[in-house]
Amino acid sequence: MLTLNMRSADRKSDYIYRQIYRQLKKEILLHHFLPHEKLPSKRDLAKGLKVSVNSVNSAYQQLLAEGYIYAKERSGFYVEKLDTLPVPFGSSRALNPELAESPDSRKDWLSFSHMSADRSCFPFDSWLNCEHKALRSRRTELSDDPSRFPQGIYSVRRTISRLLSVTRGVKCFPEQIVLGGGTQVLVQLLRQSFFQNATFAMEEPGYKRIYRLLTMQHADVRTIELDDRGIKMNEINRINPDVLYITPSHQFPTGIVMPISRRIQLLNWASRSENRFIIEDDYDSEFKYECDTIPSLQGLDAFDKVIYIGTFSKSLLPGLRISYMVLPQRLLKAFREKSRFIMQTCSALIQLTLQEFIDSGEYRKHIKRMKQIYSERRMRLIEELGKKFGDDVTIYGANAGLHFMSAFKSGETVDAILRRADEEKLELYSLRRCFLRSCINDREPRFILGFANLSKENIEEGVNRLYRAVYG
């Protein structure tokens, strides 16, 4: 009679049939049963193990479904002939220490991160109300096959097109908008749809995540340095790329706001060739200080050459992962043909909740409130830096967005400052991480100081920690 290792404690902790199933499977894989050997009848095994026949039957049915055994009518269950599983030498079920992750437990840390928004100020109750309305009134769209809406739900795109027209001067129809789960997803779609053999040019320093995405896809990516107006025109003319990726409204990471003269030069450059395009990444356009919002480059484009990309990560929450791009009409038909098999990467519920959030006026209220909050934090941070560092700090690009660049007169290297910042429990990012190809001069360390995730009450302490990191 077959006997299984069935302890009384095990009987209480798991379904009995699962224990029988696991033990039989182990015995079969270890070849303790011969191929085509008949297993005990359900009644006999149940009697021997002092369990119900139903428990044994459930175990047998699971083994049968997975192919460990087979059944003969009016005869019983038999063991399948299985090859021996190979066991690599020195194999272990333990996780390789190099792959181990630990929960983020940064208690008492302060952050100058430029990549986050303040979730403590997010109107969760209003968002949840909008989500409940979407669940009640938009059930058809929620249950529809997402492949029907590869560009995103039409009514959501219609709402976004109206918002962009009012806030950014973007000229588009809902049909031109494509939603996606982040800017990287959208750029990947663009590359696959249009620009597989294109030469790209990006700002130096610039958005390294996009640079790495393109280079990992074996794209030809050139880098062009900046002057005080943004990306250099003489270098664009020299390299003559097919696609130019820029952040004109608040250059990342230096904060340069591109003036109208350079914008016109770029549009004229793009118009001189049928296959030239500009990707305008307008990643934090909602927040401008001391001046009105600067219209988008796309709004000036009379040649249908600008691909406009934006995101709700900065204005709402990064974790919502909803971005959008506006395609020129000349590209739209080809995009639909080449991308019709792509499934939409944004949750339908998040799309519909966002639409309700915008249409109800809650988005406008939230942006107005956050602009005031971030403006106060920005001014407080600039004041505290001036008090602590005096003439030893220079600030660039502080009139827009949720970060600015700072340069410090210090005899210390960037590595030494970052090491001390860690010791001070201060999240700090150097400009070095944004250089795509060229080297950075450590004689004047430069850092990206984000203020979205630093409360007014913690700004003075954050600057004190920064001072100790810079000077030791």
Image: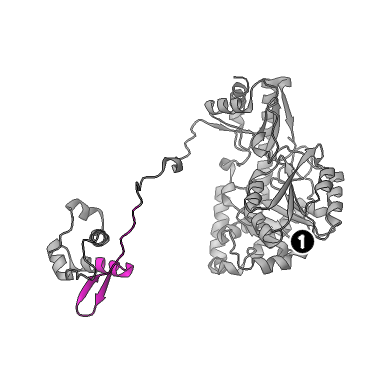
Residue 424 horizontal side relative to residue 25, left or right: right
The image position of residue 409, as x and y in percent, is: 70, 22
The magenta stretch is 58-87
Foreground residue, 149 or 458? Answer: 149
Position of the C terminus by quadrant: top right
Q: Residue under label 1, please give it.
A: 328
Q: Nearer the viewer, residue 169 or 45?
A: 45
Query: Disc 1 residue type?
Result: Pro
Residue 177, percent across and down? 70, 61
Residue occupying the point 60% across, 33% down: 455
Q: At which x and y percent is residue 321? A: 59, 52
Left or right? Give the position of 81 relative to 120. Answer: left
The answer to whether residue 362 of the structure is visible from this angle is: no
- Write down the quadrant of residue 272 in the picture: bottom right
Q: Nearer the viewer, residue 348 or 210?
A: 210
Q: Is residue 105 left or right of residue 370?
A: left
Seen at 39% across and 45% down, the residue is 95
Taking 58 as reference, is 454 above or below it? above
Q: Residue at x 81, y 60 (%)?
A: 304
Residue 35 makes an appearance in the image:
yes
Q: Is residue 250 magenta?
A: no
Give residue 307's quadrant in the image: bottom right
Specify few, some or many for label 1: CA neighbours under 10 Å numbering under 14, 14-19, or 20 or more.
many
